[in-house]
Amino acid sequence: FLSGRTALVTGSTSGIGLAIACSLAEAGARVAINGLGDEAQVKAALDAVRAAGGSDVRHFDANLLDPDAIAKMMAEIDAWSPLDVLVNNAGIQHAVPLAEMPVGKWDAIIAINLSAAFHTMRLAMPGMAARGYGRVVNIASVHGLVASKDKAPYVASKHGIVGLSKVAALEYAAVGSRDGGGVTVNCICPGWVETPLIEPQIEARRNGGSRDDGVRALLAEKQPSLRMTLPAEIGALATWLCRREAHNVTGASFPVDGGWSTQ
Ligand code: NAD
């Protein structure tokens, strides 16, 4: 159902973003991937998206810390194929108490996790509105809904992207038609998902035991299902939000957190 559509997934050389890029490609989309990584990692990501069914896949190497690089990437994508689906997924973490948080980490986390989404949205959404179909899916976090200690910039950035998404959802709510699909903006709010991002936090809870012991300890703290989410499961929800039937699903934040935020 996405054939003829073009999607950008930021931070899709790894983890959740890569799984979302694969899921959108499987549904037929032309996919722009973005993210850091050496040549081998970028090639592996491109190969994975092609293997999922992507016949037209390109990597854009913009560093999302730099608004000028974001603007250049958005212009290049627009010249390639105007954007219908924008997934703001790139994100970084640094977990230490607020008073010990390096100022540079605060700035980088806000820039990548929040400001980059503002820039891609402000540049992509007018074109979506003009064409009557657009989907923005922002990968927030359960930390867009509730807090944990030691994550001041991360929690602030994720609450920020939930707010940003609500504003954009309202501004674009009346655009388009049921048949056209309209322009929607939503957040997905995962709890623990099995990706490289959380390895330091697993490591910190091993307590001399195995990696599995670390995983069990991490889940036991906050995620009542005691199960990790797999990246492909986030991909499936992101892709569903792109369906035409989801034209009236906008401004929402979907926890995928095994009950974490419901406690
Ligand atoms: P990951 O570390 O596997 O992937 C992060 C991606 O972002 C990579 O492709 C990386 O290259 C890219 N990236 C980082 N800095 C960048 C920069 N400056 N410019 C361009 N790209 C950059 O992490 P993940 O777990 O897949 O996380 C993806 C998103 O999901 C993040 O926003 C994260 O906050 C969110 N999230 C993850 C979890 C989890 O448990 N893994 C839970 C909730 C939310």
Image: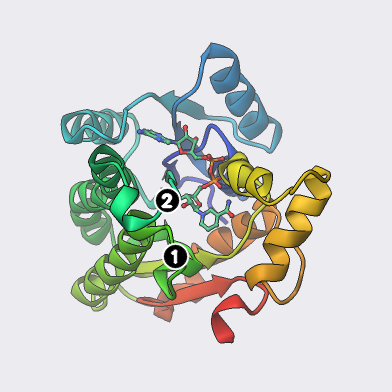
The answer, for residue 190, to whether it is visible in the render is yes
Crowd class of label 2 (few under 14; some 14 to 19; many from 20; radius 10 Å): few
Q: Amino acid at mark 2?
A: Val
Which one is in front, 35 or 199?
199
- N-term mark: 1 or 2: 2
Task: Name the colour scheme.
Answer: rainbow
Q: Position of residue 213 (x, y in %)?
A: 81, 53
Say which element carries label 2.
loop
Q: Position of residue 25 (x, y in %)?
A: 59, 42
The answer, for residue 175, to whether it is visible in the render is no
Circle on res. 96: 2
Which one is in front, 42 or 155?
155
Q: Is residue 28 above or below residue 12?
A: below
Residue located at (54% from left, 60% from top): 238
Quadrant housing residue 133:
bottom left
CA separation, marks 1 and 2? 8 Å
To which residue does mark 1 refer? Answer: 149
Apparent side of residue 4 relative to residue 86 in the rendered image (left or right): right
Circle on res. 263: none
